[in-house]
C-alpha cells in the first residue's frame, strides 16, 4: 500500500513536466534527424553549450542580475501602489466611484503605449524600466485587492459589529484574512505581468539584461543564444511563480483558508 501511494505521489509530482519533456524530445529528435533546420531552431546541444559559456564567462549572472533588479523594484513598487489603491476602493464606495472608471480607462493602454510618454519624462535610463514594469504589476494587484476586500462575508462583518469591533479591527481581523487567497493570486498575476513587461522593455531600450540577450542574439543571427535566453527567462519566471505559490499555500494553511488557485482548480 505504501509503495503504491509513493508511486502515485511520484507520478503526480512529475505530471507538470510531461509536456515539456515531450516537446524537448521532439526538438532533439527533429534536430538529429534533420527535420528541423538549424537556422530555424538550433539543436539542443548547441543551446546547452551556449548556456554553459554564458555561465562560465559570467555574462549570465550579469544580465540576470540586471533583469532581476528591474523586475523586483518595479514589481514591489507596482504591487505596493496596487494594494493601497485596491484597499482604498474596496473599503470606500466613494473612492471607488471616483477612481475606478478612470483607472479602468487608463489600464487599457498597453505598456508599449506608455513608453513614448514616460520616455519624455524620465529619459531612457533605469527609471523608464521601473515605471513600465510597475504599471504592468499595478493593474492585476489593484483589481485583485479590490475584489478580495469586497468578498468578506456580510455575516462575519455583522458578527464583528455585534462584538463591538472598530472599523480598523474589522479590516485587520475579518476583511484581510478573508482576502488573503485572492491577494496572493493577484500578486502572482502581477509578477507574471511584470516579468513579461521586463522582457518587452529590455527588447526595446536596454544594453543589458535577458531581454537584451534575445535582441543581441537575433541581430547576430545566433539563434542558440536567443533560445538560451528564452529558456532562462522561462525558468526564472517559473521559479518565482512557484515561490509565490509556496508562500500562498503556507499562509493560507496558517489561516485555515483554501488558496484561490486551488479553488479555481476545483
Image (spheres, helix red, strand yellow):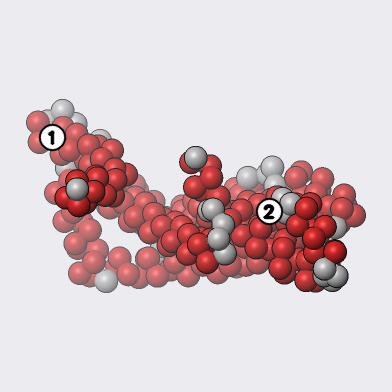
Q: Position of residue 46 (x, y in %)?
A: 16, 49
Asked whether residue 187 is in view, the answer is no
Disc 1 crowd rating (10 Å Cα; few below 14, some 14-19, many 20+) is: some
The answer to which image quadrant residue 78 occupies is bottom right
Q: Residue at x 9, y 31 (%)?
A: 33
Q: Which mark is residue 148?
A: 2
> Is residue 12 left or right of 125 when viewed as pictured?
left
> Is residue 171 left or right of 35 when viewed as pictured?
right
> Which residue is most to the right?
94
Asked whether residue 252 is in view, the answer is yes
The answer to which image quadrant residue 209 occupies is bottom left
Q: Residue at x 66, y 57 (%)?
A: 179
Which SS class for mark 2?
A: helix
Residue at mark 1: 29
Disc 2 crowd rating (10 Å Cα; few below 14, some 14-19, many 20+) is: many
Above or below, comparing residue 2 to residue 18 in the picture: below
Q: Residue at x 29, y 45 (%)?
A: 12
> Is residue 171 left or right of 48 when viewed as pictured?
right
Q: Which mark is residue 93?
A: none
Q: Position of residue 159 (x, y in %)?
A: 80, 60
The answer to which image quadrant residue 166 occupies is bottom right
Q: Nearer the viewer, residue 210 or 82?
A: 82
> Which residue is most to the top?
35
Which SS class for mark 1?
A: helix
Camera-side mark, 1 or 2 = 2
Dot placed on the residue nearer the N-terminal end, 1 or 2: 1
Q: CA distance from mark 1 to mark 2?
A: 48 Å
Q: Residue at x 17, y 42 (%)?
A: 43
Amino acid at each position: 500500500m505504501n509503495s503504491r501511494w509513493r508511486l502515485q505521489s511520484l507520478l503526480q509530482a512529475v505530471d507538470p513536466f510531461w509536456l515539456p519533456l515531450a516537446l524537448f524530445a521532439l526538438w532533439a529528435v527533429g534536430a538529429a534527424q534533420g527535420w528541423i533546420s538549424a537556422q530555424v531552431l538550433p539543436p539542443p546541444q548547441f543551446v546547452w553549450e551556449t548556456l554553459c559559456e554564458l555561465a562560465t564567462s559570467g555574462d549570465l549572472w550579469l544580465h540576470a542580475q540586471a533583469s532581476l533588479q528591474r523586475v523586483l523594484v518595479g514589481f514591489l513598487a507596482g504591487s505596493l501602489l496596487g494594494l493601497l489603491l485596491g484597499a482604498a476602493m474596496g473599503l470606500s464606495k466613494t473612492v471607488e466611484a471616483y477612481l475606478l472608471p478612470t483607472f479602468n480607462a487608463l489600464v487599457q493602454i498597453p505598456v508599449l503605449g506608455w513608453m513614448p510618454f514616460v520616455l519624455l519624462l524620465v529619459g531612457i535610463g533605469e527609471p523608464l524600466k521601473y515605471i513600465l514594469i510597475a504599471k504592468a504589476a499595478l493593474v492585476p494587484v489593484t483589481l485583485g485587492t479590490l475584489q478580495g476586500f469586497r468578498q468578506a462575508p456580510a455575516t462575519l462583518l455583522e458578527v464583528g459589529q455585534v462584538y463591538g469591533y472598530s472599523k480598523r479591527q474589522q479590516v485587520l481581523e475579518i476583511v484581510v484574512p478573508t482576502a488573503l487567497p485572492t491577494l496572493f493570486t493577484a500578486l502572482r498575476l502581477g509578477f507574471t505581468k511584470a516579468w513579461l513587461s521586463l522582457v518587452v522593455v529590455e527588447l526595446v531600450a536596454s544594453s543589458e539584461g535577458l531581454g537584451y540577450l534575445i535582441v543581441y542574439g537575433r541581430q547576430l543571427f545566433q539563434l542558440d543564444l536567443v533560445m538560451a535566453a528564452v529558456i532562462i527567462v522561462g525558468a526564472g519566471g517559473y521559479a518565482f511563480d512557484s515561490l509565490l505559490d509556496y508562500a500562498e499555500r503556507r499562509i493560507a494553511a496558517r489561516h485555515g483558508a483554501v488558496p484561490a488557485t486551488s479553488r479555481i482548480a476545483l
